[in-house]
Image (tube, rainbow, N blue to C red):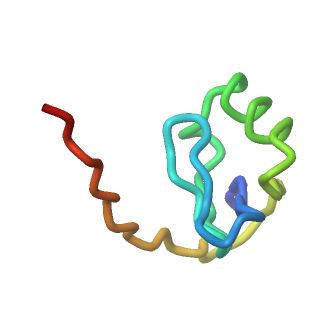
Amino acid sequence: MPQFIRITAKPREGFRRAGMHHPATAVDHPIDTLSDEDIAALKGEPRLIVETVEIDTPAPAKKVPAKKVAQTK
């Protein structure tokens, strides 16, 4: 069975770490798509719940709309 890293953000609005947005709902990432350093950073982040799971069907990522940033003149 394939291994995945299941990541869930504790904040309702989600959280960014390792170059990715992590929503408050679980998302499964194939373990081989993350470096050992990324996995260590994710597991060390107290605002994320990170689990290693073996599953047949991963939880899909949801598209997160980009936030508008105020432009300065």
Above or below for 44 versus 23: above
Location of the N terminus (image quadrant): bottom right
Where residue 9 appears, as percent x and y from the top left, is 71, 61
Where residue 30 appears, as percent x and y from the top left, is 59, 52
**10, 39: nearer the viewer:** 10
Residue appearing at x 79%, y 30% in the figure: 40
Q: Is residue 25 left or right of residue 40?
A: left
Q: Quadrant of residue 3?
A: bottom right
Residue appearing at x 63%, y 63% in the figure: 28
Location of the C terminus (image quadrant): top left
Residue appearing at x 54%, y 40% in the figure: 33
Q: Is residue 72 left or right of residue 60?
A: left
Q: Quadrant of residue 22?
A: bottom right
Q: Is residue 14 left or right of residue 37?
A: left
Where residue 49 appears, as percent x and y from the top left, is 82, 58
Q: Quadrant of residue 10?
A: bottom right
